[in-house]
Amino acid sequence: MHIFINRLKVLLRSKSIIFWTLIFPIILGTLFNLAFSNLSSDEKFSPIKIGVVENTNYSKDTNFKTLINTTSKNNDDQLFKVSYYKDNNTAKKALENNEISGYYIVNKEIDIVVKNSGIDQTIMKSVLEGYYQNYSIINNIYKFNPKEFKLSIVSELNGTNNYFEDKSNKNIDITVIYFYTLIGMVCLYGSFFGNDIAKETEANLSTRAARVSIAPTHKLKNLLLSLLAGLVIQYIEVLILIAYLVFVLGINFGNQIPYILLLTFTGSIAGLSLGLLVGVSNKKSAELKTGILLAVSMTCSFLAGMMVVQMKYIIANNAPLLGKINPVSMITDGLYSLYYYDSLDRYFYNIFSLIIFSIVMITASYFFIRRKKYDSI
C-alpha cells in the first residue's frame, strides 16, 4: 500500500503527462465538436416539397391518393411534404415561385409538372414509375386468373408485409467516429504513465529507481503496484473526458455506458502496458521514449480513422492484420459494435484482444526488468 500511494504522488507531479492525457484531449474534443456540430444535420434527408392538384380525377383515383398519403405521412420514412391546389394554374404559380419542386396532376394519366431537373424531380418520377409498374402487374394477374386474385398479392406488391427486422441504429451519426478515436487515443496515452513507471525501475536514470532496485520488495509486486497507481490516474482522466463529451458537449454515445466504461478500462491497461514495454526495452533517454510513444499513439489513432474516417476501412481491406494489432482500432471497433450492432460478440472480441495485448506487453516488460543488471548504483 505504501508503494502504491508513493507511486500515485510521483505520477501526479508530472505536469506534462497530465497535460497530454487530460487537458489536450479535452481541447481536441472541443475542436471536434465545433468542427462537426452541424455536419450530421446537413446530411439528414428533408421531405421533398411537392404539390398535388385536387381535381375530379384525383378524387376518384383512390390508389394514387393512398400512395400520396403514405409517402407524405409524418414519420421517419416521410418522403414528400404535400401542398394541395384547387387547379393547375394555382399549382403552376407555386412552382414558379419555387414553393414546390414539382406537382402531380391526374388527367387521363398522372402527369408530373416540373420547372427544372434535379434529385427531387427524379425521385418524384421514380415514385410514379413504381406506382405504374405495380399497378400493371396487379392488372395482369387479375386478367390472367381473377378467381385466384387475393388481396394478399396486393399487399405483397405494395411492400406492406415486412419479413426482415431491422435492428441497426436508426440515428447513425458519422461524426461520432471521431470521438471514438479520441477516446481510443486517450486510452493509449496511458503509455506515458507506463513509460514514467519504467523510468522509476531504471536504476541508472533516477536515485529513486536506484533505491527501489535494491529494496527487498519483489520486482513483480513493485511493478504491478506501480501499474495499478498509473491505471487509477489514467482511468479517472478517461472518465473525466467521457463525462465532458457527454454532459458538456452533448455527444450521444447511446445507452451502453457500462460497456463503454469496461472497454475504456481495458484500453487504459493496454496503453499503460505499451508504455511500460517501450520504457524498459531500451536504454534511450526518457524524453526520446516519450517522443516514440507520442508518435506511436498518433500513428495508431490515424490508422483507426481519427484524421480520415475512411482510413479504418482502407486498413481493414488492405492490411487487416495491422488493424487487429492496433490497440486504438480495438477500442474504436468495440465502440462501433455497441453503436451499430445488436450482438455483443464483436464487442467482447475486442475486449479479449485488448486483454491479450496487455498480457503480452506486461510479460515482455517483466522479462526485460528481470534481466537488467547494473555495474554500480
Image (tube, grey):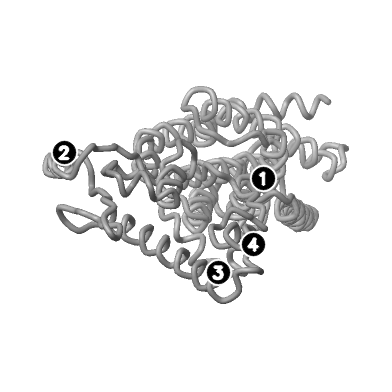
User: Mark 1 or 3, which is nearer the eye?
Assistant: 3
Q: CA distance from mark 2 to mark 4?
A: 40 Å
Q: Secondary structure at mark 3?
A: helix
Q: Amino acid at mark 3?
A: Tyr
27 lies above or below 139? above
Q: CA distance from mark 4 to mark 1?
A: 58 Å
Asked if marks 2 and 4 touch (Cβ < 8 Å), the reply is: no
Question: Does the rendering let one see residue 332?
Answer: yes
Q: What's the mark number on residue 90?
A: 2
State the residue position of label 1. Answer: 267
What's the distance in space between the residues labelled 3 and 2, CA to CA?
38 Å
Looking at the image, residue 117 sits to the left or right of residue 150; the answer is left
Image coordinates for residue 317, horizontal then vertical, percent? 54, 71
Q: Which circle's residue, 2 or 4, is located before the other in the chain?
A: 2
Label of residue 150 in the image: 4
Q: Which SS class for mark 4?
A: loop
Determine the secondary structure under disc 2.
helix
